[in-house]
Image (tube, rainbow, N blue to C red):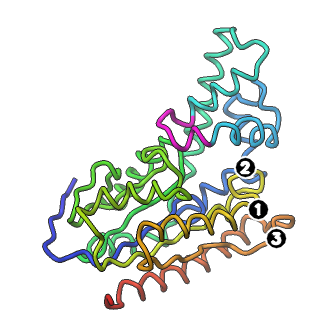
Amino acid sequence: MTWWIYTKKLEKFVLLDFSGTLSIEAVNFGQTETLYSYLEKSGLVELGVASETFFWNEIVTPTWPEGSTTRRGYAGIIADRIISLSADGNNLQRNLAVQKAASLFMASYFDHCRIDPAWKNILRSLQNDPSTQVAVVTDHYAEATAMITDRMAAWDIDAIPLEKAAKGTKNPLIIANSADVGFHKIDCRFWRAFHDRLFHHDHDDVRILFIDDFGANEAIGDNYGNNQFTPREERTRKAIKKVWGNSVDVYPFIIRFAKTDPPQAAERKKLYSSLVEKALAYIQGFVSSSCG
């Protein structure tokens, strides 16, 4: 890993959400045409996860608050939930099968969490800019931190978790994951932890660009997105601005379509690609503009 030490003062932060923003494939995994096939391939269907609705409503939604704010991990938390719902919960052999299936399913999911190649050049450019700090800020499970690190490494971009970042200097790309921080992005404590890790005192004249879909681009069955993105956007705006003040520029990265009539995969990709192009142009303008 290469560590860079810069003497030029940091002037800008570019903060990017992961699922639904950097990675549309992470969202696509949860779409109807994909999700059930992997539930079946992993063995979870045979072990009681009989439908997508059951998966979202009985497995993911009840465990998400803990799974995304602790380091228990996706595989462990969904396995424990499936076991707790079984009338045969004390059957050791079945429980081991559930744990194995949950691990297989988790591996398939994170394998799908690929960053869209359209982001590659801008991420590398931002990392090489001595006056700009780039970070991925995400509400996610614990395994996502290592996964994002590996994705960046494949593009020759050094990345570190927030807890390893140094104060008052340019860091490698920072990964601020709610599972590591302990709070979601709607909570000002998430942003306070981020701020206090990187600054000795005040953030002076640093400007922030925050790009996020606020859950709007998530799969239809995922309760993280379903009709919650508007209040989540409002709460997140308030939380980040409570810590960073008016130096924050919030850019909603939202694919506009009716949830009752979602586009097919090819059309979804086209809409996403168009949105990425607009976001990249916005980032370029933000980075090129002078402070003040």
Instruction: Tell which circle, 1 or 2, labels the residue nearer the N-terminal end.
Output: 2
Q: Circles 3 and 1: CB distance less than 8 Å?
A: no
Residue 270 place in picture, x, y as percent: 67, 75
Question: Residue beneath label 1, please?
Answer: 227
Compared with 231, 107 (above or below) is above
* Mark 2: amino acid: Thr
Mark 3, other Cα within 10 Å: few <14 / some 14–19 / many ≥20: few
Residue 117 place in picture, x, y as percent: 48, 67
Distance in Å between CA atoms under marks 3 and 1:
11 Å
Instruction: Tell which circle, 3 or 2, labels the residue nearer the N-terminal end.
Output: 2
Q: Circles 1 and 2: CB distance less than 8 Å?
A: no
Q: Secondary structure at mark 1?
A: loop
Mark number for residue 34?
2
Picture quarter containing residue 98?
A: top right
Q: Secondary structure at mark 2?
A: helix
Along the line of sight, the residue nearer the viewer: 32 or 250: 250
Residue appearing at x 73%, y 75% in the figure: 256
Locate the C terminus by quadrant. bottom left
Distance in Å between CA atoms under marks 1 and 2:
22 Å
Start and end of the magenta stretch? Answer: 65-74
Question: Residue beneath label 3, please?
Answer: 258
Secondary structure character of the magenta stretch overall: loop
Residue 73 place in picture, x, y as percent: 52, 35
Whether the magenta-drawn stretch holds residue 130 is answered as no
